Amino acid sequence: MKTIRVVAAVICDSIKEKHRIFATARGYGQFKGWWEFPGGKIEQGESPKEALLREIREELDTEVRIGDLIQTVEYDYPEFHLSMDCYWCEVEKGNLVLKEAQEGRWLTRETINSVKWLPADLGLVEKIKRFYL
């Protein structure tokens, strides 16, 4: 099975005090309208952090400060295996302009389950809700 390596930014209001996180709804493909953390594929020759900075610039027209790795999600979709490095991030410069997503939203502990998350993100969402928000 083909493995796809990606990175995801769990953008929070503050890396030190996390009260809410930013998520986006996919604007394309099989999972259009499902929610995820912004990010994307790691290109040849890029480190995960370089890929994350590039992807957030491309998708949200925003510069982020990257914090700690939360976890690497390993998930089998029917067509491929996903390996996703998920990092805490906070906005350094910019306004989170949606360039690819159909919607974006700040979520809190109370609202994090109000959206339909992509299957690969469900375990991470529960971990964030339980231990960080």
Image (spheres, helix red, strand yellow):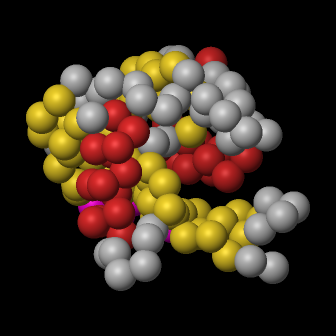
Q: Residue pushed farthest left? A: 93
- Residue 83 in picture, x, y percent from top left: 59, 69
Image quadrant assignment for residue 18: top left
Residue in view at x 45 percent, y 68 percent? 42
Q: Position of residue 60 (x, y in %)?
A: 34, 34
Q: How many marks?
A: 0
Vertical arrangement, residue 64 with respect to residue 4, above or below: above
Where are the magenta residues, as a range?
A: 68-72
Q: Pick the quarter of the image with the C terminus.
A: top left
Residue at image location 55% in from the left, 70% down from the top = 5
Q: Residue at x 67, y 34 (%)?
A: 28
Q: Is residue 70 left or right of residue 6?
A: left
Q: Is residue 57 above or below residue 12?
A: below
**Which residue does the image show at 61% across and 33% down from the upper left?**
26
The residue nearer to you, when weighing 128 against 6, is: 6
Q: Nearer the viewer, residue 10 or 98?
A: 98
Give the quarter of the image for residue 95.
top left
Q: Position of residue 25 (x, y in %)?
A: 58, 28
**Residue 6 in view in this figure:** yes
Give the camera-side residue of 17 and 102: 102
Give yes or no for residue 9 being in the magenta stretch: no
